[in-house]
Every structure is written in C-alpha cells, then in structure tokens.
Image: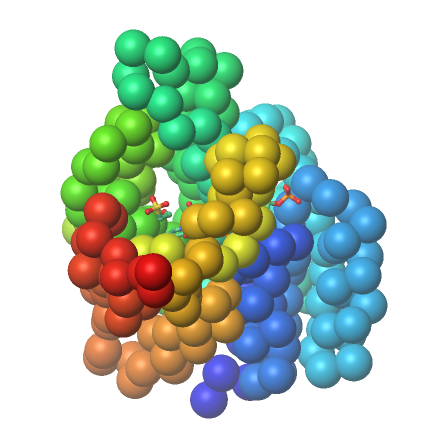
Amino acid sequence: MSQNKTALITGATSGIGRATANELAKHGIRLILCGRRQERLDTIKSALSKQTEVIALKFDVRDKTEVFKAIESLPQSFKHIDILINNAGNAHGLDPIQDGNIDDWDAMMDINVKGLLYVSKAVIPQMTERQSGHIINIGSSAGREVYPKGNVYCASKHAVAAINDGMRIDLNPFGIKVSSINPGLVETEFSQVRFKGDAVADTVYKGYKALQPEDIAEIIYFAITRPQHVNIADLLVFPTAQANSVTVKKAL
Ligand code: NDP
Ligand code: 8X3
C-alpha cells in the first residue's frame, strides 16, 4: 500500500530520522533525506539506494532561504511528497532559566519550532493542491510536561504540540493527516548534542533500557500505513522504565 509513496524526512542523518529512513526504505518508500552533514547523507543514501529511490538534500532548517531553495530543487519525479516527517531538532543545554545560554535558546526555538514551520510551509502547498498527504511531527514528552532545567526545550516542544494541533485543524478541509509522535527517552545523539559532548551525556541512557530509534521508526511506519480513514493524531511513548520526565527506574 505504501509502495511508491515519497517521504521527506528532516534530521535523517542520525537517531530517529535515520532509523525511520531505514524502516521506510525496507518497505520501498521513496525517500528525500535531509540534514546538514553531507558525508552522512551520502553514506545513508548509498546504503538505502539498494532498497528504494533516494535523494539527499543538505540544508539547515534555520535558514528559510536554504529550505525553500532545497525543496524547490527537487527533480520533478520527487516533487510529489506524500509524507512529511518533521523530525530535525535537538535540545541544547540543560540549565536553570537564570543561567540559560541565549545561543542555546535561539538554537532550540530556531530549529525545533521555526525550522519545522519553514519546512512545512515549503511542502504543504502541494499537499493542499492535491488534497492529500500526511505530516508527522516529532514532538516529545517534553511537550506534555515541563521538567527541571528543561524550560526552553520544553517550551519548544509545547510549541510543536500546538503547531501540530493547529495544522490538523487548518488542513482538515484538505483531507491531510497530521500526527504527533511524542517519545520519552530515546538513545540517540540527542544527549551528545544537549551536553555538547560532555561525559555526562554517556550517563543518560545507563541503568535502564531506553527507547531505541528503531522503536520510534516502527511507530512512524505504523502511523503512515493506517487506512485512509484512520489518523494517529497524538501518540505518547515511553520506555517501560520511564513513567514521566523525572521518574525513571534505574538499576542501582
Ligand atoms: P539526534 O541528535 O540523533 O538527531 C537530530 C537530527 O536533527 C540530526 O539528523 C540532525 O542532522 C538534525 N538537525 C539538528 N539540527 C538541525 C538543523 N539546524 N538543520 C537541519 N537538521 C538539523 O537526535 P534524535 O534523533 O533523538 O532527535 C530527533 C527528534 O526527536 C528531535 O526533534 C528531538 O527533539 C526528538 N526527540 C528526541 C528524544 C530523545 O530522547 N532522543 C525524545 C523525544 C523527542 P544534522 O546534524 O546532520 O543537521
Ligand atoms: C527528549 C526527551 O526527556 O530529554 O525530548 O526531554 S527529554
């Protein structure tokens, strides 16, 4: 059913995005892989091209000119995007608000919120014109609750939750599905980025079994393969060891 559909994945060079690219390729979905790291895009494209047709687009979601230029540059055969997966994003820093770094705040709001909007703005018009499409927004449990020192990252993911709901309402007349997938702790490069390579990043997923990026990829594949009348509007997923942002059962 999903054969020959085309999906654009932002943040496809790592973690959840990369695992989603692998999962979708297994099922023959054509892929537009996006990210800033060209070498990784090339490696992933070359591996997945054995399974499906793949195009790589290098751009920074913060740069609206780059975003529109990249998406306009798609060859005709890739211009029909059935599935948009707004996944690119990260946390930058974990500091109490009074000690927060303004560059970190800018990065989170510019990437997680404004970047998601720019990419959506570049893709949505062809979906409304066709009256079909599916947008998956990767939110977070941090979009459902606020935890100590999470302040601006949580704000960015609360914004994603609001944008997701707003998209679903506004795109309803066009028959476009809009889904939010909200994971808890997933073992990716997320903590390396959040803690800027500090050794504390290595402790985040220790002592319990965190979600793996493949777990989220499978959920995304499930969401995009429901029958036309079914939309997974909003899904929260934790590792079994996690009950909320601050309650994680770890081995002593
Ligand atoms: P990773 O750090 O492993 O991956 C982040 C991806 O986002 C990379 O592919 C990176 O690509 C891309 N990215 C980051 N900044 C930019 C930018 N400015 N422009 C374009 N692409 C960018 O983290 P995850 O896979 O964990 O994160 C993916 C999404 O999942 C994020 O939205 C995150 O908030 C969310 N999430 C993560 C959770 C977790 O615990 N890991 C839990 C809940 C949600 P490149 O560097 O090549 O540009
Ligand atoms: C990532 C999960 O708990 O680090 O969104 O915010 S958390």
Q: Which corner quadrant of the image does residue 211 belong to?
A: bottom left
Comparing 152 with 181, the one in front is: 152
- Could you say where residue 203 lies in the image, as x and y percent from the top left? 48, 48
- Could you say where residue 107 lies in the image, as x and y percent from the top left? 49, 25
Residue 162 visible in the snapshot: no
Q: Is residue 9 left or right of residue 117?
A: right
Residue at x-position 50% and y-position 15% = 103
Residue at x-position 27% and y-position 71% = 240
Q: Residue furthest front?
A: 252
Comparing 204 with 159, the one in front is: 204
Please say if 93 is above or below 51: above
- Could you say where residue 167 lies in the image, as x and y percent from the top left? 26, 48
Q: How many marks?
A: 0
Please say if 128 is above or below 3: above
Residue 138 visible in the snapshot: yes
Q: Is residue 140 left or right of residue 55?
A: left
- Could you say where residue 53 lies in the image, as x and y percent from the top left? 72, 73
Q: Which corner quadrant of the image does residue 12 belong to?
A: bottom right
Please say if 103 is above or below 109: above
Residue at x-position 24% and y-position 32% = 148
Comparing 14 with 240, the one in front is: 240
Quarter of the image with the C terminus is bottom left
Q: Which corner quadrant of the image does residue 155 belong to?
A: top left
Comparing 153 with 130, the one in front is: 153
